[in-house]
């Protein structure tokens, strides 16, 4: 089973709203990722959690706040977003953290389409 | 920073034709991954490559890890309409760290 699930599928929010994106994997993977993707562009890395600890933050604005409650769950809390934050938000996981020398395929979820009005 | 040059940017082909796309870099990579993304969905892993010179197939798809470790190609044989989508290469350097993505190849297949 190589499934990563994400909820919700679609989200529309105003600039003053607070919302959360959720991601789950039951593959026993030790690393989880948040990516942002604009139309027809490659995914851009936002955050990496390795063994439930934040290991990489790609200088993401503080209006995006990640959380890893346990080894299977990853949240992204959103607050005071801007219209330019509208994008497809992808969660991914890998068996080993990105700095591991062993094989390290990343598996992506279906994404959350976020629209900020 | 490291970059992956993926080409072509887009392809318009007839159903049944073969397709080839590639990624090159000035840096050495120790992992090459090929993903396909349908509109509104997440990327799906097609093929993973870990050794220089490795040639791997997955149905009608074949991918190779270049001998120099600086390039990889993906071939699709006998294309069908459901092959439509954006194909991304991604690589990881020996130093590990985040995946480096190519800019994508958008494939259109005319029935």
Image (tube, coloured by chain):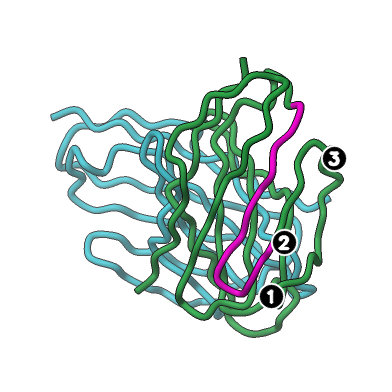
Chain colours: A green, B cyan
Badge 3 marks a residue whose secondary structure is: loop
Q: Is residue B15 left or right of residue B105?
A: left
Which chain's residue wears label 2?
Answer: A
**What are the residue bounds of the magenta stretch?**
A68-80
Residue in the image at 55% along x and 51% along y? A22
Q: Alpha-carbon distance for marks 3 and 1?
A: 24 Å
For the point 51% across and 63% down, the residue is B33
Disc sitting over residue A62 in the figure = 3
Residue B66 seen from this side:
no
Q: Which residue is mark 1?
A: A97
Establish whether labels 3 and 1 are both on one chain: yes
Instruction: Judge by depth and name the residue closer to the eye, A42 or A20.
Output: A20
Frontmost residue, B45 versus A77? A77
> Can you give x and y, in whole percent of width and height, for residue A6 in the image?
47, 51
In the image, which is nearer the foreground, mark 3 or mark 2? 3
Q: Nearer the viewer, residue B98 or B11?
A: B98
Mark 1 touching mark 2, by CB under 8 A?
Answer: yes
* Label 3 Cα crowd, 10 Å radius (few <14 / some 14-19 / many 20+): few
Above or below — where is A44 with respect to B33?
Answer: above
Image quadrant where one finds the C terminus of chain B: top left
Q: Does residue B4 appear left or right of residue A94 in this picture?
A: right
Marks 1 and 2, how far apart in space? 8 Å
**Residue at 53% of width from left, 56% of height from top?**
A23
Q: Which mark is residue A48?
A: 2
Q: Nearer the viewer, residue B42 or B14?
A: B42
């Amino acid at each position: 089973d190589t499934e990563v699930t994400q909820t919700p599928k679609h989200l529309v929010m105003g600039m003053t709203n607070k919302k959360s994106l959720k991601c789950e994997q039951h593959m026993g993977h030790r690393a989880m990722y948040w990516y942002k993707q604009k139309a027809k562009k490659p995914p851009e890395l936002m955050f990496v959690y390795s063994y439930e600890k934040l290991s990489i933050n790609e200088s993401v604005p503080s209006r995006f706040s990640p959380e890893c409650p346990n080894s299977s769950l990853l949240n992204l809390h959103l607050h005071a977003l801007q219209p330019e934050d509208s994008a497809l938000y992808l969660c991914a996981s890998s068996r080993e953290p990105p700095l591991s020398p062993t094989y390290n395929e990343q598996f992506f979820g279906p994404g959350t389409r976020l629209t900020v009005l | 920073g490291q970059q992956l040059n993926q080409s072509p940017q887009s392809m318009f082909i007839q159903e049944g034709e073969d397709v080839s796309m590639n990624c090159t870099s000035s840096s050495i990579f120790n992992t090459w991954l090929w993903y396909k993304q349908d509109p509104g969905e997440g990327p799906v892993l097609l093929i993973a490559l870990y050794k220089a010179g490795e040639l791997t197939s997955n149905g009608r798809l074949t991918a190779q890890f270049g001998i120099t470790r600086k390039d990889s190609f993906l071939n699709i044989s006998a294309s069908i309409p459901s092959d439509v989508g954006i194909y991304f290469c991604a690589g990881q350097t020996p130093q590990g760290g985040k995946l480096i993505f190519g800019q994508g190849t958008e494939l259109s297949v005319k029935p």
